[in-house]
Structures are given as structure tokens and as C-alpha cells.
Image (cartoon, coloured by chain):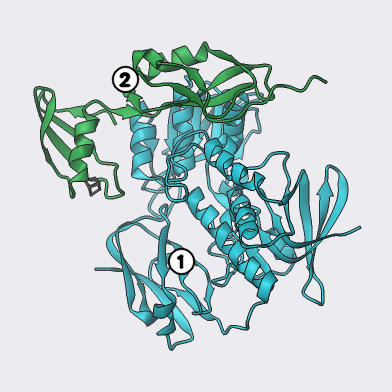
Chain colours: A cyan, B green
Amino acid sequence: MWENYDLAIIGGGPAGLASAIRAWKMGVESIVLLEESNFLGGVLPQCIHPGFGLHYFREDLTGPEFAAKLLDQLKSTGVNVLSGSYAEHLEVKSGGEKEISGYMYGRAFKVKCKAAICAAGCRERSRFEVNILGDRPVGVYTAGEAQTLMDMYGVLPGSEIVVVGSGDVGLIMARRFALEGADVKAVVEVMPYPGGLTRNIIQCLEDFHIPLYLSCMVTEIKGSRRVEGVKIVRVDEKLNPIHGSENFLKCNAVILAVGLKPRVELLAKAGALIDEATGGPVVNDWLETTIPGVFAAGNVLVINDLVDYAAEQGERAAESAAKLIHEGFPTFKFKRVVLGRNVRLIVPHLISCAQDVTFYGRVGKPEENVQVRFEEISRAFKLPIARPSEMFRFKISADDLLKMRDEKIMVNVVKV
Amino acid sequence: MSPIVKDDQVLEFTCIVCPMGCRLRATLKDGKVCSVEGNRCPRGIVYAQNEVEPKRILISVVKVSGGNLPVVSVKTSEPMPKEMMPEAMRILSNVTVQAPIKIGQIIIRDFLGLKINVIATRNVDPVQPS
Ligand code: SF4
């Protein structure tokens, strides 16, 4: 038996919630929200530190507070929430109708919809994706798992901890462990520069006297039952291990904060084109994937620095879906966004030039006093400090984009 | 970070107000900042003045009895002096609250005599009698 909706949203994290609320406000009356776990909010409920919502709510909130605000708004809508439902297949029928099927508490479910928004979020990379070999003892967790243990269930994952990865997630977790009384032995970073924001280096590491080992790599985990320690080696500029620089660091827990990957399986299986740079789907400025009527928002689209951006993309996707449902999409001739000098990734990938566009991107390597230049329309934005870990976000108006005569728009990061 | 005390009069630290991360040198007189060098903008001066006695929002979890979760996340309603954090954590580790707990509920009033409160940042429902 199929249930029919105008809009189906896959994922009840910040992007999915924001899109459900926005779509309802835009007058879409038949909406289903598919969430695989038994609570809403995605990763927010376990991110108990402040720093969320400065853009979106103009307030400094903790993760659970940010989620609660969205859930409050959701309550006043007629969105049908199906929690515990895992969407496995998405298929587009000849009339453009989409069918989504999957499992809900062990039983099959199916929904039909005119438009779908994929807000499936991301997953954490595992030790094997960063070649950490050795034993498989108790005490190896991803940062997210450790966070669930500690901040949802009050269990400290170890008393002597090594954190792998110095992105903001790793830094924030290092501080949480130290605050709760664990001895954080080190944060280990393979790059010669830290992955996270300066403010987190200072407030998370220096405030708690936690050592940061740059240009170092954890190569092996040792321990028969419980983690007993890790093997660390220094790396050269090409990130190759330096022979003879091995060291053993004693610890009883290893926390991996080694990056996030968009969960694109559903979209990829359905035939959406995936961008190697972002790991997410290729989208146009409506945040529509290469499957017509299927949109993407949040960390499944591109790994965002801020939950605010994920929510903003959710709203954007909802506005597009509402337009499609109410009036249909005109046919556009899209122009390609091309990655130029020191631009590692950028979304959206295709632009219609029919509306204002918010671009999100990252540089490839750290630089100072640079400009992000959109060549064909001669627009440039200053970036005093450019770091791979800090997303840039610029809005360009339709008026500017209309000036474009070429078939593509090249984005370069150049010295001023 | 803890300011590096060069001598009684000069403190050095990194401004974290924006990503520029200026290295600041603040000169003190009678415990007050009288001049700042190294800042690329005026916000660095305000930052330096505050950083002489650094304050942070404290976040943690406290135990819950009778709830659908064993702990509830909390934060201080205002930033508190950094050097009081170890003591604050000791106190929080000995607190147990009864479910249900509502987001924004005061867990500890006038925490450490600082005229700030410790408040819950999530809802915890009571366990359903099975
Ligand atoms: S002094 Fe101004 S420019 Fe420098 S880090 Fe602070 S806020 Fe940024």
C-alpha cells in the first residue's frame, strides 16, 4: 500500500526539519518526514556545547536548544513525521512521480510524492579509511559515538584518551573529555596545520593544556582486550611516515575525528550524479540534484561548518520543492561553475541565472589576504584568512549573474 | 588560553574574535589593561580587556533519576571565570535531578555565589512505567 504526499523529506536533522517547516509555510500541505532513528534533531541533541544558531536564530544556542526551537516550530505544522523509518530506495516513475520505499521498525513502508528532499546527513569516517591498523580492542570510538556515550548517557569513553584529527569536532571533544576529568594525552593531526578554528584551538586545547601533535599520524592501535596505546609516527611534507620517528603513546581510548562523508547511497542508487570534490550530489541553484524533482540539503549536499548553513539549505530546497509542486519548473539552460585556482569545492554546481545564488565553498590550501573571484561576472569577495577548514559563503544577485555571457563561470582564489 | 605572563605588566594572547587570530600584547596597570598592541581592529582591545580575567560558558551533564535518559545536558546562564571551572565540575558531578526536566529549567540557582544559574539545555521525560 502506498501513501501519497506532495513532498517527502528524508532525514529529520536540522536540514530536514528546516525544510519541513519552510515547505509548510510555503503552502505545501501534504508533507511526510522520514527519520530513521526514534528522535528528531539529527546530531544536534548530542552536541551540548554552545555556538549554534548565531546566524539562523541570531542567538547563541547549544545543539539540543537549537533542535528544540525547530521542533517547536514543527509542532505547529501538519507535517506527518514517520520516525524509525529508513528510506532505502528512491525511484522516479514515468510521470515524474517519485516512489520511496524502505523499512519502518522492521516492516516495509512505501510513499509516493511529487517532490523529494534528501537531507540524509553524513557519516563519520572509520579508522580503516585512514589506515589505522593493529588490534581491534574495546575503546576505539568515532567522535560522534563518544559524544553519544558521554553527553546522552553520561559515560566517559576512557580515562587516558588520544584524539585523532584536529578538526572542530576533535577539538570540541578533547575539551569535553578534559572537563569531565579524563587525561587527554594528545590531539594528533597529520597536516602541518590544525584543522579547526583558531578559537577552538585556544578554548579547547590551550585552555586545558592539551598537546597538539602536528604532522603526526597514528598508524596502529595496540591492545588485547582494552586499548593499551597507539603508535604515532611523524610525517614529511608529502605526508609519508618518517622512518625511525615511531613513538608509543599509552592510552585506554582512541577517539577518531577524521572527517565526515555525505550519505549519498540513496541518491547514487537512484542515479544522481555525485561530485567527487564534495562527496555529495551535483545540484543546480534550486538545490535540485540531477534527478528532476529530487533536492538535497545539509550535510548530504556538502559537509557544512555550521548547522545554520544546513538549515539555510533546507529552507532553500523547500522553497524550490514548493515552486515545483505549485507551479512546476520552467526549463532552464544551466551554466557550469568551474573550480579554479585553490578552490577545492563549491556548491551549487550549475546555475540558472534566474535568481540570487548563495555559494558555499572551501579552499584547497591555507592562504592569507586572498580574494574569491567569480571571473565571468567580475565579482570578488575578500578573504583575509583562507583555510580549508573554514567554509566560505557568498551571495550573488540574479542581476550580476545575468551579465554572464559565457557557458561557465570560473571561480578562482587569488592573492590581492 | 591562559595569558602568558611575561612580567607583571605585559600579557600575550591570541585574539579569537575573528579568524585573523591577531597576537595581542596587553600592558597592564593596576590589574587593568592600559594599552594593547598587535590588534588589527578595535574588537581586539575589548577582547584583551575581558581576557585578563577570562570567562567561559560552562557546559556539562548532570545525573537524572527516573528519566528516559540517565543525564541531562546543562550550561551556565552566563560566562563564568575560567579558573573556577574545576570546582564547578566537582559540584556538578555530585548533583542528581529528578525527571521530568524542561529545557531552560534552573538546575542550580546562584551557582558558586556568582549570581548565575545552571540551566538544563534539553527536555528529559520521566520513564514510562512498563
Ligand atoms: S584584533 Fe580584530 S582583526 Fe585581530 S583577531 Fe581580533 S577581532 Fe580579528
Q: Position of residue A311 (x, y in %)?
A: 54, 53
What's the chain of the residue with tag 1?
A: A
Task: Look at 82% across and 46% down and name the residue there.
Answer: A104
State which quadrant residue A140 falls in: top right
User: Disc 1 marks which residue?
Assistant: A359
Q: Is mark 1 within 8 Å of ligand 1?
A: no
Seen as rendered, the residue at the extreme bottom is A405
The type of residue carrying mark 1 is Phe
Of residues A83 and A345, the one nearer the viewer is A83
Seen as rendered, the residue at the extreme right is A1
User: Disc 2 marks which residue?
Assistant: B83
Q: Is residue A84 left or right of residue B116?
A: right
Q: Position of residue A81 (x, y in %)?
A: 74, 48
* For residue A374, above or below residue A163: below
Residue A154 in view of the camera: no
Task: Look at 43% across and 56% down and name the residue there.
Answer: A391
Q: Position of residue A319 (x, y in %)?
A: 59, 65
Task: Look at 45% across and 44% down and name the residue there.
Answer: A167
The type of residue carrying mark 2 is Glu
